[in-house]
Image (tube, grey):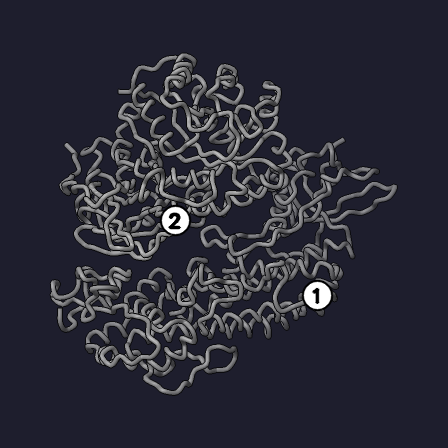
């Protein structure tokens, strides 16, 4: 049971007073300034001994203090700290039946702001952070600051406020004078419910905030967390751990000049699984989290300590203290095939906590590591033993190394070897990994076991692999493996044609990793990686490639690629053996002019009949009448199929964009100009950049799927459209211009210029053919970031181009969306020029025009308590201006150019809502000029590849439609 609770004030004073008894003082004075690293500390019941140990552990790893999470200001807690600041959990504080808000924390702050252990911010005043805004507004915060004569340092998390993640000017206008910085939580993990990174470790969501804080000379506190897994309190979710922690460390260090604080999330939040400290038994006795939060995470502490020293120092991670190696190895303790069959009656918890968590599929069967080696180290390696299977990872170097390892059922251990082959550090003795029907925690627990590296060569003794849910064959090729086993010990089963991968490892398991395909790989049971070759002079390899067993050839060549499911295509690409074979081919022969080498090899030719480096040559076709069984080896047929379809897609894009689209758009552009006038030539560069932005981000594409492919979800085009996005992302030069067209060429009216725009941008297709099929990196790319071989590989890795019908549909969808968006933006730009009328967004609040009345008005749309419509202004000068809605034929014409009229209204309103929300300052009728903030409206945001999302596709870029907002005449307020 939890320890007896006592009053908040008594416990806090006890906590702070005990600080003076902490040995050795503190690592950094709470009053000192400069970069600091904190950890979020969940305040609750704990013993004095345990609090003392938390402080010692935090000091040992180099933390500067704890952010005390206080859910309610009258909640009792026991804790003592060395650099304390209070983090108001306004989200939890607002819970019924006794909700609390910012004012309720005042007495707590009055008592402790002056304590010598209380943390001071960059301005020298007491620091306060928050977990959320808790629904509070800027006026509440202003009043709270005034109560302390503004002598505070406030750095809250306001991610629930509209405009926060984009750092919208409207957001900053309301909050800029209230805060001294910002602190984000949700960006610490991968995307969920619209918040988080695009991949584990991504800091992309933080960047607008980092840049905004830099611009306004405020401070940014970034979150750092290993994962989020919660299977309690009506929640069952997993947000990928894997390499989230080390990848985010690296990204933070790259941007450390613009980041002032780091907050480790968290020290001791056991139910969320992102703790790095000890979870003491008295802190949480609830049955649900008890099933999964018992695994040790302290192994992360010294790695984070190395990061903290680098963040506060020169940005370079080094082993911590006297360590030869600082590192951690972590892994989940069940495999993906584990079946957990316990019932609520067996374990005493509800069924929802026994189910697989949301995003369980992202918890793949891999171990992960983060190892910091001494500067100058090279040639070090890591030997991983997972379930009795050994793998060696080479190429470790000075600084932070991170990556994945194999993960098999059984005991786990890792050894670090220096360049002389001596074992200098080990990690082991952690929990075993279980698969099949073994489910030791009774739930699908993906909370990782974290093991720290220690110096020496003696691997700790393995734990017994006997935990249970405590509820009351070599030689000739054989048959295709059905269970992932292969080789002489498994009836000569063959990996090629299986769904597990095409290499047979030394231990007789099918897969595609270096461990499977490298040293010890059974060539007689799969495809093995070879060394680098300059010519194909290996007679034995050629003989093997030519003499595949007929049954195997038949099985491979009969695999059906006529599916629109992208995951199935990827699976079948792997199943054919083509994925492994092609990756091996690139590694052996290199990427430079790889298509020449490819066609010579697979067709056994000495002369070339193929040329894939130029568009419209007709010399880079697919297999045509050539049969799969005639290829050497047969899996290369599927590589050729992808080559032909990718090249055909480029041909189609060119034809549809340059030939067809330019002609088809001529009528639309003429009509736009005739209706609304010619956009200023000065806006042509904006139109061009938006054109590239749409091509790259696929903005609006989901809205046009039904036009080209009725009833189709966007996801089936994800792989080819991602490649298209990447092609045109390279069209933009570093200075914001577009390659292939000069500023002087844009200095003409739109009717004459738009064709040049299309041709210039589509010229990137030819450049892509040279890079992809020629095996050279694009301009500005470095082999330090990606090898030419990997650059080629990523264009085919998922089997993107195996289905020609899917390719055709993807091209059509892409082209149609581009044409429509080009016309839309040209229309908005022409209307804004004011050649024909002073176009505006009309906005009427619901108290003047109800939702029902709005629904009866053609061309109007009710949004955020306003009835919206497009219109224009009449009058002016001495006469009052009168807003008039666009109706009738004018409205029908506008709908032709802006088919998603409601989406355009919403985009316009969200761009600059100030005028609509502040009627007193921005009236409908005024004989004097309105304040600038009533009429100022941001320029459109040019989208990029970072905005590309198939799960939450962008409808319109921000301020794509950006007319000035005016009150509607139907809503005159006297």
Element assignment for label 1: helix
Residue 85 showing in the rendered view? yes
Residue 258 sits in quarter: top right
* Foreground pick, 259 / 68: 259
- Specify which label sits upstream in the sequence, 1 or 2: 2
Residue 560 showing in the rendered view? no
Give the number of the mark in front: 1 or 2. Answer: 2
Q: Which quadrant is the C terminus positioned in?
A: top right
* Foreground pick, 926 / 184: 184
State the image coordinates of residue 675 (x, y, percent, origin top left). 74, 61
Q: Residue at image x 47%, y 24%?
A: 86
Residue 682 sits in quarter: bottom right
Q: Residue furthest right?
A: 878
Relative placement, left or right, of 812 versus 746 is left
Residue bearing the label numbered 1? 746
Residue bearing the label numbered 2? 375
* Foreground pick, 10 / 720: 10
Relative placement, left or right, of 875 versus 255 is right
């Amino acid at each position: 049971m939890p320890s007896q609770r006592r009053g908040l004030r008594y416990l806090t004073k006890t906590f702070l007073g005990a600080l003076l008894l902490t040995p050795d003082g503190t690592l950094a004075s709470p009053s000192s300034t400069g970069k600091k690293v904190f950890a979020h500390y969940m305040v609750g019941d704990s013993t004095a001994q345990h609090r003392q140990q938390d402080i010692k552990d935090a000091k040992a790893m180099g933390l500067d203090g704890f952010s005390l999470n206080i859910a309610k200001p009258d909640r009792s807690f026991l804790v003592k700290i060395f650099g304390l600041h209070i983090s108001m959990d306004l989200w939890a504080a607002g819970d019924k039946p006794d909700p609390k808000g910012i004012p309720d924390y005042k007495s707590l702050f009055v008592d402790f702001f002056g304590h010598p252990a209380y943390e001071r911010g960059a301005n020298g005043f007491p620091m306060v952070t928050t977990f959320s805004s808790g629904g509070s507004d800027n006026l509440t915060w202003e009043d709270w600051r005034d109560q302390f004569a503004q002598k505070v340092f406030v750095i809250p998390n306001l991610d629930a406020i509209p405009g926060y993640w984009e750092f919208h000017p409207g957001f900053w206008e309301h909050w800029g004078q209230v805060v001294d910085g910002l602190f984000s939580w949700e960006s610490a993990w991968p995307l969920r419910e619209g918040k988080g990174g695009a991949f584990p470790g991504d800091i992309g969501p933080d960047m607008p905030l980092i840049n905004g804080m830099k611009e306004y000379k405020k401070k940014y506190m970034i979150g750092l967390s290993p994962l989020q897994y919660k299977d309690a309190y009506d929640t069952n979710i997993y947000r990928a751990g894997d390499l989230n922690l080390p990848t985010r460390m690296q990204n933070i260090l790259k941007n450390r000049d613009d980041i002032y604080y780091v907050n480790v999330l968290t020290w001791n939040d056991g139910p969320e699984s992102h703790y790095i400290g000890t979870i003491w038994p008295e802190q949480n006795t609830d049955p649900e989290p008890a099933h999964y939060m018992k695994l040790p995470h302290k192994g992360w502490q010294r790695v984070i300590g190395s990061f903290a020293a680098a963040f506060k120092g020169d940005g370079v991670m080094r082993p911590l203290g006297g360590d030869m190696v600082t590192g951690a190895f972590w892994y989940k303790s069940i495999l993906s095939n584990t079946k957990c069959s316990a019932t609520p009656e067996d374990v005493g918890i509800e069924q929802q906590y026994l189910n697989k968590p949301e995003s369980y599929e992202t918890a793949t069967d891999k171990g992960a590591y983060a190892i910091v080696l001494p500067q100058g180290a090279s040639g070090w390696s890591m030997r991983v033993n997972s379930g009795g299977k050994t793998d060696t990872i080479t190429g470790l170097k000075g600084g932070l190394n991170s990556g994945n390892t194999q993960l098999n059922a059984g005991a786990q251990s890792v050894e670090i070897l220096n360049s002389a082959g001596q074992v200098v550090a080990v990690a082991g003795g952690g929990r075993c990994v279980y698969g099949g029907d073994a489910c030791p925690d009774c739930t699908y627990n993906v909370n990782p076991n974290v093991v720290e590296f220690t110096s020496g060569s003696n691997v700790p003794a393995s734990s017994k692999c006997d935990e249970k849910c405590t509820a009351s064959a070599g030689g000739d090729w054989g048959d295709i493996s059905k269970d992932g086993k292969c080789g002489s010990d498994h009836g000569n089963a063959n990996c090629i044609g299986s769904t597990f991968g095409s290499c047979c490892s030394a231990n007789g398991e099918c897969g595609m990793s270096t461990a499977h395909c490298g040293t010890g790989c059974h060539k007689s049971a799969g495809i093995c990686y070879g060394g680098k070759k300059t010519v194909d002079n290996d007679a034995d390899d050629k003989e093997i490639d030519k003499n595949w067993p007929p049954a195997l050839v038949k099985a491979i060549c009969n695999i059906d690629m006529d599916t629109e499911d992208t995951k199935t295509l990827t699976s079948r690409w792997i199943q054919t053996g083509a994925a492994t074979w092609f990756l091996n081919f690139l590694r052996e022969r290199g990427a430079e002019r790889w298509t020449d080498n490819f066609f010579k090899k697979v067709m056994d030719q000495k002369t070339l009949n193929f040329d894939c480096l130029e568009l419209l040559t007709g010399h880079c076709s697919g297999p045509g009448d050539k049969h799969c069984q005639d290829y050497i080896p047969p899996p290369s047929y599927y590589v050729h199929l992808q080559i032909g379809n990718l090249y055909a897609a480029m041909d189609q894009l060119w034809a549809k964009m340059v030939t067809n689209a330019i002609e088809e758009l001529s009528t639309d552009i003429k009509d736009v100009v005739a209706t609304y006038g010619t956009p200023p030539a000065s806006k042509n560069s904006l139109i061009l950049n938006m054109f590239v932005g749409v091509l790259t981000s696929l903005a609006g594409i989901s809205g046009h799927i039904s036009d080209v492919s009725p009833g189709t979800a966007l996801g089936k085009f994800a792989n080819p459209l991602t490649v298209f996005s990447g092609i045109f992302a390279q069209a933009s030069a570093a200075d914001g211009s577009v390659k292939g067209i000069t500023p002087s060429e844009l200095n003409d009216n739109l009717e004459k210029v738009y064709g040049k725009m299309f041709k210039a941008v589509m010229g990137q297709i030819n450049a892509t053919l040279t890079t992809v099929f020629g095996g050279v990196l694009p301009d500005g790319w470095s082999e330090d970031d990606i090898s030419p071989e990997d650059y080629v590989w990523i264009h085919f890795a998922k089997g993107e181009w195996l289905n020609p019908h899917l390719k055709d549909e993807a091209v059509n969808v892409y082209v149609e969306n581009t044409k429509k968006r080009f016309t839309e933006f040209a229309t908005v730009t022409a209307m804004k020029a004011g050649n024909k009328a002073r176009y505006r967004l009309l906005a009427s609040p619901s108290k003047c025009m109800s939702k029902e009345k709005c629904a009866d008005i053609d061309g109007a749309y009710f949004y955020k308590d306003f009835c919206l419509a497009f219109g224009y202004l009449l009058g002016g000068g001495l006469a009052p201006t009168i807003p008039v809605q666009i109706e009738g034929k004018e409205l029908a014409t506008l709908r032709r150019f802006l088919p998603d009229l409601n989406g355009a209204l919403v985009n316009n309103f969200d761009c600059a809502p100030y005028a609509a929300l502040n009627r007193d300052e921005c009236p409908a009728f005024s004989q004097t000029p309105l304040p600038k903030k009533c009429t100022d409206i941001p320029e459109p945001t040019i989208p990029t590849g970072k905005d590309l999302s198939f799960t939450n596709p962008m409808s319109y870029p921000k301020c794509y439609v950006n007319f000035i907002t005016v009150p509607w005449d139907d809503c005159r307020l006297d």
